[in-house]
Image (spheres, helix red, strand yellow):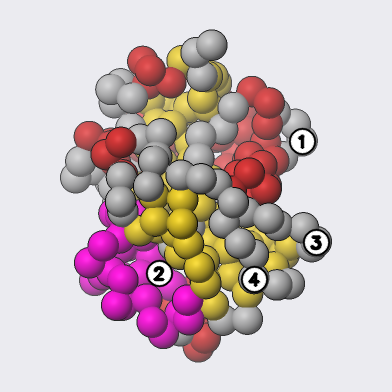
């Protein structure tokens, strides 16, 4: 069966964020656009359609000043193979529809990829938008910080990962995918510092 994914119009999104790229600070208008104007399309067609942005919850899973870092061994997006990410996430599917579709999708990904149980404190920390590669130009990230009570194990066979101290992220930066590089501050930004404050 063809996977269907949530998208918004690239042009409508641009009316809110303008020409901003990289880490974009939180703006409720973006969430309102996704909630009211988002619609589902076949993923195969969306992958090369720059008139639409596929919405990706990109969830930084943290516990006691450590963050989950994962390596993609067998990703759905082959262009991300063997890249390290400091967030987990994926496309939003019709099964996620509800009062808070974005959060539902974020929690589904967390439960699918790790052995998570218990409580989570989450917040939307901002957004990610890059335009340097074909992958970047058709995706838009909603960045969550998800603080959990204990470290979890990765159970997705396509991933391997572990928790690392925020202060150690620079050692992984050269192997990171583009969005994670932005969050780790490797493109001249300090998004993690903004999100975590003095804990970095």
The residues bearing labels 3 and 2 have C-alpha atoms spaced at a distance of 27 Å
Q: Does the CB distance between marks 2 and 1 fall below 8 Å?
A: no
Element type at mark 4? loop
Q: Mark 4 points at which residue?
A: 151
Q: What segment carries the magenta color?
A: 164-192
Q: Mark 3 points at which residue?
A: 118
Q: Nearer the viewer, mark 3 or mark 1?
A: 3
Q: Nearer the viewer, mark 1 or mark 4?
A: 4
The residues bearing labels 4 and 3 have C-alpha atoms spaced at a distance of 11 Å
Answer above or below: position of 84 versus 193: above
First in sequence: mark 2 vs mark 4: 4
Say left or right for 25 vs 146: left
Q: Mark 1 points at which residue?
A: 99
Residue 15 location in percent, x, y?
A: 39, 37
Say left or right for 27 vs 190: right
Q: Does the CB distance between marks 1 and 4 fall below 8 Å?
A: no
The residues bearing labels 3 and 1 have C-alpha atoms spaced at a distance of 21 Å
First in sequence: mark 3 vs mark 1: 1
* Residue 191: mark in rendering: 2
Q: Looking at the image, which residue sits at the far right?
A: 118
**Picture quadrant of residue 80:** top left
First in sequence: mark 4 vs mark 3: 3
Q: Compare residues 155 and 29 and report the one nearer the observer.
A: 155
Q: Which class describes the residues within 10 Å of circle 1: few (<14), some (14-19), or many (20+)?
A: few
């Amino acid at each position: 069966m063809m996977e269907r994914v949530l998208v918004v119009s690239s042009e409508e999104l641009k009316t809110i964020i303008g020409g901003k790229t990289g880490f974009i600070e939180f703006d409720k208008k973006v969430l309102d656009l996704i909630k009211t104007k988002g619609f589902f399309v076949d993923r195969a067609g969306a992958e090369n359609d720059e008139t639409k942005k596929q919405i990706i919850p990109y969830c930084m899973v943290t516990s006691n000043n450590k963050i989950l870092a994962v390596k993609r061994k067998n990703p759905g997006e082959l262009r991300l193979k063997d890249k390290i990410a400091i967030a987990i996430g994926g496309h939003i599917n019709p099964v996620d529809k509800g009062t808070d579709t974005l959060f539902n999708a974020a929690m589904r990904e967390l439960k699918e990829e790790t052995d998570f149980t218990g409580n989570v404190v989450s917040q939307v920390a901002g957004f990610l938008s890059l335009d340097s590669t074909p992958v970047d130009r058709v995706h838009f990230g909603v960045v969550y910080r998800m603080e959990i009570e204990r470290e979890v194990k990765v159970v997705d066979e396509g991933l391997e990962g572990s928790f690392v101290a925020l202060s150690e992220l620079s050692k992984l930066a050269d192997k990171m995918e583009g969005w994670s590089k932005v969050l780790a501050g490797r493109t001249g930004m300090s998004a993690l510092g903004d999100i975590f404050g003095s804990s970095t």
